[in-house]
Amino acid sequence: MAAAPWAPHASFADDSGMIADRYVLAALDCPGAWAWYGQTGGHMLLGRMHCETLKKVAPDEACTVTAWPISRDGRKVYAGSAVHNAAGELAAFGFATWITVDEVK
């Protein structure tokens, strides 16, 4: 599992003053790869990702981003990720397929 604090900068806010969904969803991307760190050889490319937002996030809000490995099928690994707001409520979640690749030398 991987986890990190995230307080999105006010420059990511939309016209409503809240963080635009595209930035909240972007925070779900790389943590899925980190959830597999040390288990795959370390080199992966994002295959597909499905994400949804459930709640708005305020600028500078003390959020937590988490990710966890789900399963592996050959070179494909699957991971979940989530953003929780300062109240601990689920603000967004994602499911990603990552493809392991050999190191380029």
Image: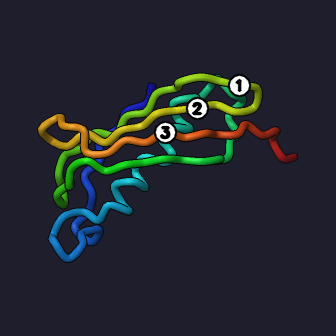
- Dot 3 corresponds to which residue? 95
Which quadrant is home to the N terminus? top left
Q: Position of residue 73 (x, y in %)?
A: 71, 25
Kind of residue sitting beneath label 3: Phe
Q: Earlier in the sequence, mark 2 or mark 1?
A: 1
- 83 vs 99, left or right, is left
- Few, some or many C-alpha atoms within 10 Å of disc 2 (few <14, some 14-19, many ≥20)? many
Of label 3 and label 1, which has the lower sequence position? 1
* Residue count near mark 1 (Cα–Cα under 10 Å), binned few <14, some 14–19, many ≥20: few
Task: Name the residue carrying label 2.
Answer: 78
Name the residue at 53% across, 35% down.
34
Residue type (three-letter) at the residue carrying disc 2: Tyr
Q: In the image, is 89 to the left or to the right of 69?
A: left
Which amino acid, mark 1? Answer: Asp
Residue 9 location (% of width, % of height): 26, 63
Instruction: Where is residue 4? Give x, y as percent.
Output: 35, 38
Residue at x 52% of width, y 26% of height: 69
Q: Residue at x 67, y 46 (%)?
A: 45
Residues at discs 3 and 2 in contact (Cβ within 8 Å): yes
Q: Please say if 95 is above or below 50.
A: above
Q: Which mark is residue 43?
A: none
> Residue at label 1?
73
